Amino acid sequence: VKTFLVTGAAGFIGAAVARYLVGKGNEVVTVDNLSTGYKEAIPTGVEFYEGNCQDEYLINQLEKYDFEAIFHIAGQSSGEISFDNPIYDLQTNTQSTLLLLKLALKTKCTKFIYASTMSVYGDAEKLPVNESMNIEPKSFYAVGKIASEHYMRIYQNYGIRSSALRLFNVYGPGQNLENLRQGMISIYLAQAINNRHIIVKGPKERFRDFVFIDDVVNAFILACENLKDIFCIYNVCTGIKATVEEVINIIKNNLDFPIDIIYKGSTPGDQFGIYGDASLFKRATGWQPRVNLEEGLKKMIAWAINR
Amino acid sequence: VKTFLVTGAAGFIGAAVARYLVGKGNEVVTVDNLSTGYKEAIPTGVEFYEGNCQDEYLINQLEKYDFEAIFHIAGQSSGEISFDNPIYDLQTNTQSTLLLLKLALKTKCTKFIYASTMSVYGDAEKLPVNESMNIEPKSFYAVGKIASEHYMRIYQNYGIRSSALRLFNVYGPGQNLENLRQGMISIYLAQAINNRHIIVKGPKERFRDFVFIDDVVNAFILACENLKDIFCIYNVCTGIKATVEEVINIIKNNLDFPIDIIYKGSTPGDQFGIYGDASLFKRATGWQPRVNLEEGLKKMIAWAINR
C-alpha cells in the first residue's frame, strides 16, 4: 500500500484526485483549510488535517509519513478573488509550495506534482499558448503560481522530481456551485439553476479551453507516473477554443426551463481569450482528453440538477 | 519640501539613496528591521521606523505621510542566504512589495522604484543579458524579486507608475564588511583586510558586472524622475565583464600588505558569469555609469582601511 499526500482534497480537483487514489487501494492524507472546500467533499477513507498548507507547524506534523508522491492542489484558485487579499493569496499559493517542497526533501519523497494555471500566460500574443511562450500574469493568483513553479525548478537540484500542470478551465461534477466568483462554467450553471438567468461579466466572444475533471485527474496520475529527472511544465488542455456564447448555448439547450442571459461589467485580471497546446504533455505521458465540452457539460448539468 | 519613503535605509544601498535625498533638502522616512543593516548607518535626519516591511501593522502606520515616491530597497539581498530560510525571504522580498504597493495606492503616491536584481536571469544563454531575455532564477531570492516585478506590473492598472531596477553587483564605501556571505567584493575585501587572505568559493574565471554605489544612487534618482505611464524593467550595470581574478588583482595591488588567495568550494544558486546591457535604461533616463572598477575599488579600499 502506498501513501499519497493530496492537498486540498475538500476542493473540486483535490477531492477527485484523492478519490481516484483511494479507489486504487492507496492511503491518502490531505490538508485542507475548508475555506472554499467542504469537509463532506473529502472522499471516505482520506486522512484529514484541517489547516493551512502555509502553516509550518501543521506541515511539520506530516514528517511521520512516507509519501510516495505529493500532489499539491490546495490553494485559493481564482484570479478575481486574489485581488481581495493578495497577501493571503501569496501565502496559500506560494508559501505553501515552499513548505511542501521542504517536506518532500526532508521525508525523501522525490515525486511532486503541482496544480499550476493557464493564468500565468496573461493575454498571450499567440494562440494556442505553449509552455515556452512568454508569461505575463495579470492577477496576484497567477504571480504566486509562477513563483511556485520556479521553486520547483530550484528543488530539482535536491533530487525532487516535479511537474507543474498548467490547468486550463477545469469543470465537471463536484465543482463548487456556491461560489459565484470562481470557475466560469460553475458560475454560469449555478446562476442558471438557482436564478433562471446568467449574468455574464464580459463579452460573449471571450473564449477558453475547457477540460473535464476526469481528464484532469488522469493528467495528475499520468504526470506522477511519468516524472522526468528535471522539472517540467505542462499545459493540460484540450486545444479546442470554446466561446462564452457556446458554453451558454449548451447550458440553455440542456435545461428543461428557459433562462435569461444578461451581459454586465467585467472581471479584474481576466484574460480575453486563451486556449492551449498540450502536445508536450501528450508526448511525455500519453495523456489524451477524452470528454468533449458538450458531453462533459451534460454530465455536469445532470449532476447539478440532481444534487 | 517633498517626503520620500526609502525602505532599508540602514543598509548599503538604502542608506546611500536616503543620504542623497536628505542632502537635496527632502524629508525621508525609512523602515528597516536592522537584520543586516546598522542603526548608525541611517543618515542623520531620516525618520526611522524599526520593523519589517512585510509587517502590515507597521506599514499601515505610514498612511499618514504624503510621499512623493517610494523607493523599496529593503530586503534580504543574498541569493546564497535565501537558501537558509526561503519563507523569510519570500516575506521580506515579496510580501513587503505587496504591502508597499497597497500603501502607494491608498496614499495616492504614484511613483514606485524597486531594487530588483540581475539574479533573475540565472545562467543566461546569451550575454550580455537584456531585459527581454528569458529568466530562470536559481535562488529563492531571485524568485521573490520576480514576483515583486509582476506585482508592480499589475499595479500599473491602478495608476502606480513603477520601475524595477535589476541591479548587478553593487559595491563601494558603506557596504557591509561584517557579512561574509553577501556581496562578492565586500566579502573579498573584508577577508583581505581582516585575515590577510581571501577564500574564493568557485572558479576565478567567474565574472560579474560591478557597478559603483554612486552610480546606483544616481540610477534610482533618474528612474524616479523618468517614470513612464507603464511599468518598466531596467538593467543597471556597466556592460563590462570583470572576472573574479581581475577583482582580486586590483585588491592585491592596492593593499600595503601581501595576501593569500585560497580557492575552495562553491555557493548554492550562484551564477557562473553574467554581465548586462543597460542601453534601455540609458535611453530612458540618460543614466551613465561614471566610476570604473579600478577607481571604485580604490575608493572602497581607502574607506575600508580607514574605518
Image: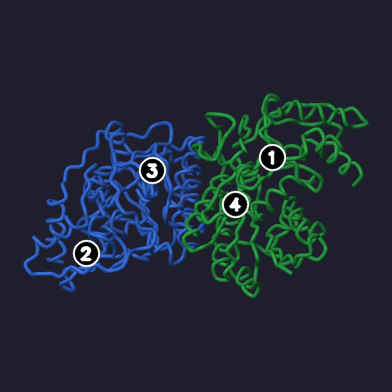
Chain colours: A blue, B green
| Residue B169 circle label | 1
Q: Label 3, on which residue?
A: A164
Circles 2 and 3 on the same subunit = yes
Q: CA distance from mark 3 to mark 4?
A: 22 Å
Q: Amino acid at mark 4?
A: Asp
Query: Which tag is nearer the camera, tag 2 or tag 3?
Result: 2
Q: Label 4, on which residue?
A: B89
Asked if the residue under mark 4 is in contact with the one under mark 3, i.e. CB atoms within 8 Å, the reply is no
Q: Amino acid at mark 2?
A: Tyr
Left-right relation of B157 to B223:
left
| Residue A188 circle label | 2
Q: CA distance from mark 2 to mark 3?
A: 28 Å
If you read the primary sequence from the N terminus, does the residue marked by circle 2 or circle 3 appear first?
3
Left-right relation of B40 to A294:
right
Q: Amino acid at mark 1?
A: Asn
Q: Residue at x 35, y 44 (%)?
A: A165
Residue A227 figure quarter: top left
Residue B235 x/y as whole percent: 61, 42
Asked if the residue under mark 1 is in contact with the one under mark 2, i.e. CB atoms within 8 Å, the reply is no
Query: Which tag is nearer the camera, tag 3 or tag 1?
Result: 1
Which element type, helix, strand or loop, lies under badge 4? helix
Circles 4 and 1 on the same subunit = yes
